[in-house]
Structure formats: structure tokens, C-alpha cells
Amino acid sequence: MTNKNKSIGILGGGISGLSAAYKLSSENYAVTVYEKEKQVGGAIKTYHQDEWLVEEGPNTLMVKSKEVWELLEELNLTDSSIEAGKTAKKRFIVKNDRPIPLPMSLGSFLITNLFSARAKFRLLKEPFVSQSNNEDESIADFITRRLGREPLDYAVNPFVSGIYAGDPKTLSVKHTFASLWNMEQQYGSLLKGMFKSDRNNNSKSSLLSFNKGNQQLPIAIANVLDKKVQTNTEIQSVVKNGDKWTVKGQQNNQPFKDEHDIIISTLPAHSLPAIFDDSIFKPLNNLPYAPLSVVALGFYDKQIEHPLNGFGMLIPEAEKRKTLGVLFSSSLFPGRAPENHQLLTCFIGGARNPELAGKQKQELQEIVLSEIRELLDITGEPVFSHHRFWPKTIPQYEVGYDKFLNQIAEIEKQEKGLFIEGNFRGGVSVPDCILSGFKTAKKAHTFLNGQ
Ligand SMILES: Cc1cc2nc3c(=O)[nH]c(=O)nc-3n(C[C@H](O)[C@H](O)[C@H](O)COP(=O)(O)OP(=O)(O)OC[C@H]3O[C@@H](n4cnc5c(N)ncnc54)[C@H](O)[C@@H]3O)c2cc1C
């Protein structure tokens, strides 16, 4: 039997599913991707209006791994990829009602007023803090123990909101900031670890987007897969019948049914119990996802006094504001706003204020504007606005997440021929999801060839 005769159903046309499909299709498997929406991309969504380009989902892709660089080359995307300018290295953190640059060198760290003299002195003690014996720890406990309270409040807390829309008191450091956890495990100290890993780090890394926005990436993969991607197709049930898996659902509002040798699911964890209708899937409902709203606001240059010379501005919880952060989108990449205009992308809700995320556009716009007006010295009203609500965005890898991973492994052991992946397993970033997709494709290939 050749690979062509082996049929693989892939549930979900986000970046995880498309990456797995891309690899398996290049090995000549008969792949079908089922995506309920009209367009592929899942969380990667780019909105265009006149000359405005808004990322409703990810704004930047941190590409480090060889496999992801190779994928971009194979898709002929390197020419349309754009690297964030040098200015993106500068990030502002709000303290006492002003955006302050996060120090990026020892010299700027010593003179910054983001941290008190006491907090700076406390950092010097970090190499002497003893290692924890805990198997897992929250980010807040880990950082306070190693670095003290101020770095948690004014460096880590805002970044956790920016990356995970999450709460450092509940997220697992081992699963979200694995490099920090590993530095403690390996070197007994973060400062020692940073010094050593800086010297060993030779990999090429870039912060990227594409000139038509990030959705260009999933669209490029779907174009290669062509008819193997079936959009407007919602999967409602998946059942094993003998050696085959039967998928059923609605395609263009008509019932449909297909059969496959194996299934790769990349659907959100919480949707699996209803689709697979077996009690073993029930615990997957327990993985929390944070709700988040993205509010994009456009202004004339002259309306904003702040030079917007950076990646953006993060707002720590300790500052008691509602907005989580603001990306200076038109400073990051060209082509985000018409000439003489600026685009700001603001985030609100998350694990910090989940009740706010689902509010109406007008209310959110007023909240965000009232807060960033004074921080960035903005006058007048925005000339453009766009809103996107994500009821369940980013899975929260909380302390105890190992139990969840074990549960997935147990399901895969019992349900032969079913592979489960997605941003709730193996990392939430787009490059992590691509690598997870590739890894799952490899597992599926091994399974099919070992049969
Ligand atoms: C606001 C926001 C900002 C982000 N910022 C960044 C960033 O700057 N950098 C970064 O690297 N990452 C970022 N991320 C994270 C990253 O975008 C996601 O983790 C990643 O895109 C998830 O991909 P996925 O394929 O695993 O899941 P998804 O994109 O959720 O894909 C799952 C797919 O399954 C489909 N589906 C669901 N149910 C069914 C069904 N029953 N039948 C058929 N199809 C179904 C969905 O429509 C969806 O297309 C951000 C995410 C969000 C939401």
C-alpha cells in the first residue's frame, strides 16, 4: 500500500492543522483538512480596510527554528516577509502614569527609574538564591523567589499579559517560561544561565510579519494544499468503526460524512468532549482559555505626541488600569496605516479582567482611549477603529498542566490512530504550533508505517 492510499482527516484549518497537513501531503498521503470557517488561519486573522491593516490575532512571529525558516522559503514567503525595525527592541512599561523604556543593557538598568535601588540590589543576590525542590511552580512564586517582587510587578506581570493574556499567579513557569525554569535547573541561577546561554546562542532569529499581514502564512499553505482543504465544514462527531474513523458534520450547511485511516485533531481542547462523545475526553473541558478583546485605533500622526518609537507599551496590573497593553503597530511594520497616520492595537480583558473582554466595541473603545490618551498624549478622536472579541483565546498552561498533558497521552494510547495537537500542547506561539504540526505529522507517519 502506498502512502496515497492512506487517508488522513485533519480537524481544524488553523496553523497547527495546516502545518501537519503540509508535511503529510508532501509525503503523498491523502490528506483532508476540515475547517468550519470560510477562511483558513484560525487565530491568525488579518483585517483590511482601505489602507489600514489590522491583525486581529498574532501581530509578530518570532522565527528562530530552521524548520520554520525552511517552510517560509518553500512557500516563497521570504520575499514578502518583513522584519520588525530596530525600534521594536524598545518596549515601554507604564509606571506612575508614564511609559518608561524597559532597560535592555546593564548600563540602562542601573539608571532606570522603573525599579527602585533596593530592587536592583536584590537582583545581585539572585545567584545565591537556592533552587526549589518543587516539581512545578507559578510564574509569580518563581520570580518573587529568585528576583524579588518589583521585577514580577513591573517586568514579568505585563509580559505574561502580553503573551498569554494570563495571570502569573496561576500560570506554570515550567510550561510558559521553560527557558527560565531550565536555567534554574541547569545552572542554579538565572543570571548565570543568561550569561552562558547568550554565549552559546548562534541561531538566526527574527521578529516577522508579512506585507499583506500574518494571514498570508496560512493562506499560502492552504494554496499548496488546494482542494485538500475544505472550508465551511464543521465537524460534529468523530467515531471509530473497526479500522476506520468516521467524521460527520455540516459542509456548506449540508450534512456530510467521510472515512479516514487516522485523525489528527487540532480543534480547541474544550470542543473535543462533545465531538468524540466518550468520557475519556471529558477532562479536556477543564483547560482554561482567557477571553480577550483587540481594539485597533487609527490617528493622524499629529494627534499623538509620543514618538511611538518602540514595540509597544505594556501596563502592569499594579498600575490598576483596564488596558493590558498597546502595540505601536505602524511603528513595527510598514503598510499598517495610510500615510501620515498611526495604528495602535490595544488589548483588554484576559485573565486579569475577563468580564471586560466581551463588552461592546463602543464601551471598550472609550475605556481604552481614556487610558491611553494621557499615557501617549493623544488629542481628539480616532479616525479609524476596529474591534475583535475572542471569547476563548489562548489556553492557560496553569500549575498542574502536566496532568492535562498526561490525559492527552492516555487518550492517544487508548484511541489508536487519533492524534491530538493544537496550541494547548507544545506552545501557543505560531512558530511553536508549526513545529507541533510537523512533530504530529511525523508521529502519524510512523504510526501508519508501523501498522
Ligand atoms: C489575540 C491574539 C494574539 C496573539 N498574538 C500572538 C503573537 O503575537 N505571536 C504568536 O506567535 N502567537 C500569537 N497568538 C497565538 C497564536 O496565534 C495561536 O496560538 C495559534 O495561531 C493557534 O493555532 P491553532 O491552529 O493551534 O489553533 P486555532 O488557530 O484556534 O485553529 C483551530 C481551528 O479549528 C477550527 N475549528 C474549531 N472547531 C471546529 C469544528 N468543529 N470543525 C471544523 N473546524 C473547527 C477553528 O475555526 C480554527 O480555524 C495570538 C493569539 C491571539 C488570539
Image (tube, rainbow, N blue to C red):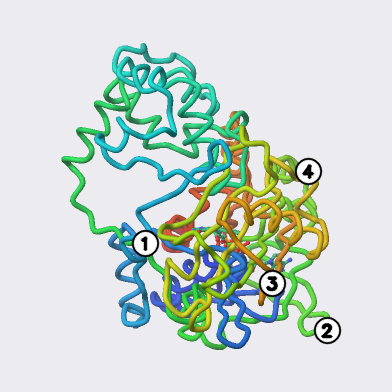
Image quarter for ligand 1 equals: bottom right
First in sequence, mark 4 or 3: give its number. Answer: 4
Secondary structure under the numbered disc 4 in the rendered image: helix
- Say which residue label 1 marks: 207
Question: Hey, what amino acid is under mark 3?
Answer: His
On screen, residue 122 versus residue 230, left or right, reads left
Answer with mark 1 or mark 4, whichever residue precedes in sequence.
Answer: 1
- Whole-percent x and y of residue 235? 74, 69
Labels 4 and 2 touching (C-beta < 8 A): no
Query: Nearer the N terminus, badge 4 or badge 2?
Result: 2
Give how far apart the Cα atoms at labels 4 and 2 are: 28 Å
Viewer can see residue 314: yes
Q: Amino acid at mark 2?
A: Gln
Question: Who comes first in sequence, dot 3 or dot 2?
Answer: 2
Does 201 appear above or below 108?
Answer: below
Task: Tell me, yes or no, whether the two marked residues, 4 and 3, touch with CB atoms within 8 Å.
Answer: no
Tell us which disc is closer to us: 1 or 4.
Answer: 1
Q: Residue at x 28, y 27 (%)?
A: 191
Asked if the residue at label 4 sits under 8 Å from ligand 1, the reply is: no
Query: In this rendering, is residue 108 above or below 268?
Result: above
Give the amino acid at mark 1. Leu
Q: Which mark is residue 254?
A: 2
- Whole-number angstrom distance, CA of label 4 to CA of label 3: 41 Å
Residue, disc 4: 279
- Residue at which label 3 appears: 386
